[in-house]
Image (tube, rainbow, N blue to C red):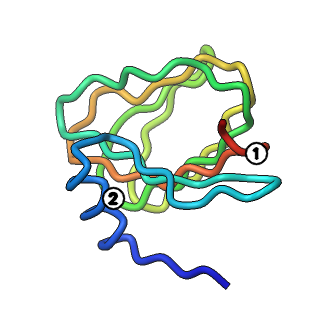
Amino acid sequence: MKVFRLDDLDAERAANQGAYLRFLKERSMSAGLYALSAGQQDPQAPHAQDEIYLVVSGRASLTVGDETTAVARGSVVFVPAGTAHRFHHISEDLRVVVVFSPPEP
């Protein structure tokens, strides 16, 4: 069993001065914590893996392909591999658990 605490992960991510911290990589999946501050731009490009986003805090809009939705704590979104997507109009600091399958390189 592996157990993670979001507060600890966020502190580690911040200490490494990055927006993303991968905290798990297994044969069939990987997971990370992604953080964007209010007003920040999301620079990500499409990924080769399917993704699931679980918003743990904050508020923003998320565009996946040609669809846009508001996301906040408790939102869960599936993003198919190769699909353009980005968070925008981030009105509250955003923390998102990201699960990739297969694992990111």
Task: Please report the residue visible at 39 percent of the width from the left and 43 percent of the height from the top.
Answer: 20
Task: Please report the residue visible at 52 percent of the width from the left and 18 percent of the height from the top.
Answer: 45
Relative image position of residue 22 (x, y in whole percent): 50, 51
Quadrant for the N terminus, please.
Answer: bottom right
Q: Name the residue under label 1.
A: 101
* Among the 4 quarters of the image, the one containing residue 91: top left
Name the side, left or right, on which 10 lies relative to 74.
left
Q: Which of 80 and 9 is in front in this view?
A: 9
Give the mark toward the camera: 2 or 1. Answer: 1
Which of the numbered marks, if any, corresponds to residue 57? 2
Name the side, left or right, on which 67 lies relative to 74.
right
Relative image position of residue 10 (x, y in whole percent): 30, 61
The amino acid marked with disc number 1 is Ser
**Local crowd size for mark 1, using a 10 Å CA cut-off: few (<14), some (14–19), many (≥20):** some
Which is nearer the N-term, disc 2 or disc 1?
Answer: 2
User: Helix, strand, or loop for circle 1?
Assistant: strand
Q: Which of 73 and 43 is in front in this view?
A: 43
Label 2 – label 1 distance at C-alpha: 23 Å
Relative image position of residue 47 (x, y in whole percent): 64, 25
* Among the 4 quarters of the image, the one containing residue 36: top left
Which of the numbered marks, if any, corresponds to residue 63? none
The amino acid marked with disc number 2 is Ser
Report if the CB atoms under discs 2 and 1 are less than 8 Å apart: no
**Local crowd size for mark 2, using a 10 Å CA cut-off: few (<14), some (14–19), many (≥20):** some
Task: Please report the residue visible at 54 percent of the width from the left and 81 percent of the height from the top.
Answer: 3
Task: Please report the residue visible at 29 percent of the width from the left and 41 percent of the height from the top.
Answer: 18
